[in-house]
Image (spheres, grey):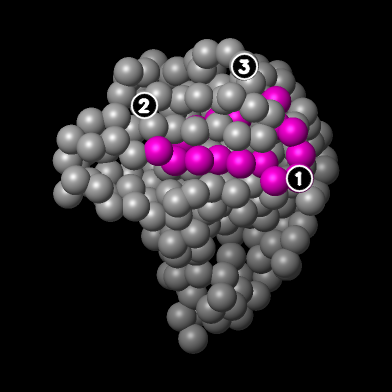
Amino acid sequence: GDSVTQMEGPVTLSEEAFLTINCTYTATGYPSLFWYVQYPGEGLQLLLKATKADDKGSNKGFEATYRKETTSFHLEKGSVQVSDSAVYFCALSDRGNQFYFGTGTSLTVIP
Amino acid sequence: GAVVSQHPSWVICKSGTSVKIECRSLDFQATTMFWYRQFPKQSLMLMATSNEGSKATYEQGVEKDKFLINHASLTLSTLTVTSAHPEDSSFYICSASRGEGYTFGSGTRLTVV
């Protein structure tokens, strides 16, 4: 079945450091891929998405490229800020409209 | 656009009582709504999928008599946790779909004491 494997955390970075959170997926079809962010005490917010191979999703300085050949959708940001501290979830959605989430990666950015 | 309102955002209840959580799509009609549960430091697990006017489809291992889901209209789905116990304490999140897009509610933190 479909699944998402996400880099385990927690991750602690200094402000302005480079961020990579790895995500790989398994799917029988051609899913859409997403990154969601959950700030403390809040629900999920869509950060970015990509719907087909080679698409790049981007938002708020974060980027992720849909790589079909490596079945990956790694999240990157060139310079993190304290306000980026949150839990990040990689997810896929198949044609059945069901989401499969990774286990989440907690990011803490220290000044 | 595409706003989903979830209420309440947090609730504390006594063991043995029931709690209802509402999920509303404010500016679109949601043909399908999903209910997820999130345990501390874990990912979201799909509990059930509900389509307007029909019975919800529960994931394996989810007690449908304990977690009652009603999707009475295209803009409202409710999750009722019946006879709640401390192990039901969790973060519950709904998601509404209007075809291609999905929007999540802000979640409800349930604490059963």
Q: Residues within 10 Å of mark 1 (few under 14, many from 20)?
A: few
Give the mark nearer the N terminus: 1 vs 2. 1
| Chain ID, mark 3 | B
CA gap, disc 1 and disc 2: 26 Å
The image's mark for residue B53 is: 3
| Chain ID, mark 2 | B
The image's mark for residue B67 is: 2
Q: Main secondary structure of the magenta part?
A: strand
Q: Position of residue A109 (x, y in %)?
A: 49, 75
Give the mark nearer the N terminus: 2 vs 3. 3
Relative placement, left or right, of A28 versus A57 is left
Q: Which residues are magenta?
A: B20-36
Give the mark nearer the N terminus: 3 vs 1. 1
**Between residues B80 and A109, which one lies in front from this camera angle?**
B80
Going by the numbered disc 1, the residue's amino acid type is Asp
Q: Position of residue B72 (x, y in %)?
A: 59, 24
Using the rendered image of the protein, determine whether residue A90 is visible from the camera's viewpoint.
no
Residue wearing tag 1 = B27
Residue B63 included in the magenta stretch of the image: no
Going by the numbered disc 2, the residue's amino acid type is Phe
Q: Secondary structure at mark 3?
A: loop
Q: Secondary structure at mark 2?
A: strand
Which residue is rendered at x = 82% and y = 40% of the image?
Answer: A54
